[in-house]
């Protein structure tokens, strides 16, 4: 007869508040890094380019992105909590990382290089990566998928804005 060993639950299940807070803070801080590139350009290059009438006021972007990064953090935590031993969870988290990297690449492309075309080249695959992340997350934890939906809506809007800025300039 073999002894049954109790396994230790994964970290996000043992320490849910701490791990959720950590993931959310990490997403918000990493996302804010793009703001370091964006902020100086808002008062310089971005003011000089032509923008469509549907461009939101500049003050809208900071709060919206902060909220979206926080929602992404909660979604990532829910996926992680579902157990990285599960192949679907690993795929969902892998797609999450890809979309997050593409998201972080957009600000240097658009603002840093002052190139709406490069921004568009980054944001289109970002949009598809978000759709893929939402789709696979649905199979893991529907809450994570739903938390990413406002992000998809905003990036859809941002894609239209980016495209129109490219066409106008």
Image (tube, rainbow, N blue to C red):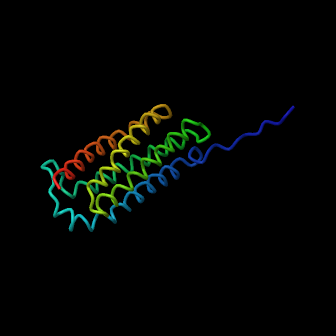
Q: In this image, 101 relative to 87: left or right?
A: left
User: Residue at 32% across / 41% down in the picture?
Assistant: 150
> Horizontal and vertical percent for residue 86?
59, 37
Picture quadrant of residue 27: bottom left
User: Residue at 44% across / 43% down in the picture?
Assistant: 75
> Horizontal and vertical percent for residue 100?
42, 50
Q: In this image, 50 relative to 18: left or right?
A: left
Picture quadrant of residue 25: bottom left
Above or below for 73 versus 149: below
| Number of numbered discs visible in the structure rendering | 0
Image quadrant containing the C terminus = bottom left
Q: In this image, 36 relative to 30: left or right?
A: left
Q: Residue furthest right?
A: 1
Picture quadrant of residue 66: bottom left
Above or below for 12 versus 49: above
Q: Residue furthest left?
A: 53
Between 62 and 128, the one nearer to me in the picture: 128
Above or below for 31 versus 138: below
User: Residue at 27% across / 53% down in the picture?
Assistant: 117
Image quadrant containing the N terminus = top right
> Horizontal and vertical percent for residue 19?
52, 51
User: Residue at 73% across / 40% down in the picture?
Assistant: 6
Q: In this image, 14 relative to 33: left or right?
A: right
> Horizontal and vertical percent for residue 111?
29, 61
Between 25 and 54, the one nearer to me in the picture: 54
């Amino acid at each position: 007869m073999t002894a049954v060993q109790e396994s230790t639950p994964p970290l996000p299940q043992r320490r849910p508040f701490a791990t959720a807070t950590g993931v959310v803070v990490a997403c918000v801080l990493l996302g804010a890094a793009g703001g370091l590139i964006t902020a100086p350009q808002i008062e310089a290059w971005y003011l000089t380019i032509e923008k469509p009438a549907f461009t939101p006021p500049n003050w809208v972007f900071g709060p919206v992105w902060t909220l979206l990064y926080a929602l992404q953090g909660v979604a990532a935590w829910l996926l992680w909590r579902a157990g990285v031993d599960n192949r679907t969870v690993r795929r969902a988290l892998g797609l999450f990382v890809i979309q997050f990297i593409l998201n972080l690449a957009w600000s240097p492309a658009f603002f840093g290089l002052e190139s709406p075309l490069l921004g568009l080249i980054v944001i289109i695959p970002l949009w598809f990566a978000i759709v893929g992340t939402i789709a696979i997350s649905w199979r893991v934890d529907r809450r994570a998928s739903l938390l990413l939906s406002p992000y998809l809506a905003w990036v859809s809007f941002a894609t239209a804005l980016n495209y129109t800025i490219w066409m106008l300039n």
